[in-house]
Image: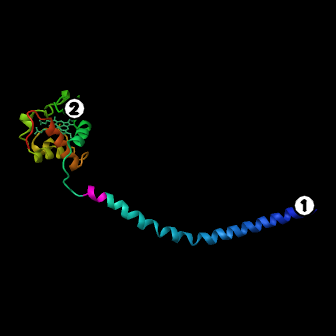
């Protein structure tokens, strides 16, 4: 008998504890939301905008031919060839043929502004073939400058700025 009583008693205590716990959970839940909502957004925003700032504006950073080389292999070499000899795998199918960027006699008189325009807006922007696609959608202005620096490094005879 005493065992049953104990069971009933402990069940009662359990229920009471559960009610207390529930009550406590409820009361501790209400003050919590304002606490967590306050500090999170202000501290998260400033660091996010800070690193973006330098890359955002049209800051002219010095062109980097090594970085340009990497983009050239991805975006240009299929037509112009890895070393700019106009012999990429796609070149055979093209008419007119892709320019030979290693041909200094042809390339050196072309200005940086002209090269920037043809790369960003495509051949038609300078009266050339549409086979020379506009790459402004894939490359940032800085990436285009880097690619131009790389093209200049291919020229034979060498490009004199
Ligand atoms: C789909 C093939 C293709 C790709 C990819 C391509 N080009 Fe061309 N490019 C051409 C062709 C074809 C011409 C020749 C256009 C003409 O003579 O009318 C050309 C011409 C050029 C010229 C010479 C323009 C002139 O006045 O003779 C430059 C500079 C050039 N491309 C740069 C690039 C760069 C840099 C990239 C990569 C960012 C690139 N091209 C990607 C096909 C391509």
- Residue 61 position within the rendered picture, expressed as x and y whole percent measured from the top left: 20, 52
Indicate the quadrant where residue 71 lies. top left
Q: Residue furthest top?
A: 92
Residue 54 lies, in percent from the top left, at 27, 57
Highlighted magenta segment, given as a residue range: 52-56
Q: CA distance from mark 2 to mark 1?
A: 88 Å
Q: Kindly identify which residue carries mark 2.
A: 82
Q: Quadrant of the C terminus?
A: top left
From the viewer's side, name the closer residue of 90 and 73.
Answer: 73
Mark 1 sits on what residue?
3
| Whether residue 90 can be seen here | yes
Residue 159 vs 57, above or below: the answer is above
Q: Residue 11 is drawn in which quadrant?
A: bottom right
Tell me if 71 is positioned left or right of 11 in this view.
Answer: left
What is the quadrant of the N terminus in the image?
A: bottom right
Quick check: can you spot residue 130? Answer: no
Callout 1: CB less than 8 Å from ligand 1: no
């Amino acid at each position: 008998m005493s065992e049953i009583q104990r069971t009933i008693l402990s069940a009662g205590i359990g229920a009471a504890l559960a009610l207390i716990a529930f009550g406590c959970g409820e009361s501790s839940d209400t003050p919590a939301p304002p606490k967590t909502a306050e500090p999170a957004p202000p501290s998260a925003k400033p660091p996010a905008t800070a690193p973006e700032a330098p890359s955002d504006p049209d800051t002219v950073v010095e062109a980097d031919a090594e970085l340009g080389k990497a983009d050239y292999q991805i975006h240009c070499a299929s037509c112009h060839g890895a070393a700019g000899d106009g012999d990429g795998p796609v070149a055979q199918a093209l008419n007119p043929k892709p320019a030979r960027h290693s041909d200094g006699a042809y390339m050196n008189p072309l200005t940086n502004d002209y090269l920037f325009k043809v790369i960003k807006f495509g051949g038609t922007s300078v009266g050339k073939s549409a086979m020379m696609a506009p790459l402004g959608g894939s490359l940032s202005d800085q990436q285009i400058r880097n690619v131009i620096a790389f093209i200049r490094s291919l020229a034979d005879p060498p490009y004199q700025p």
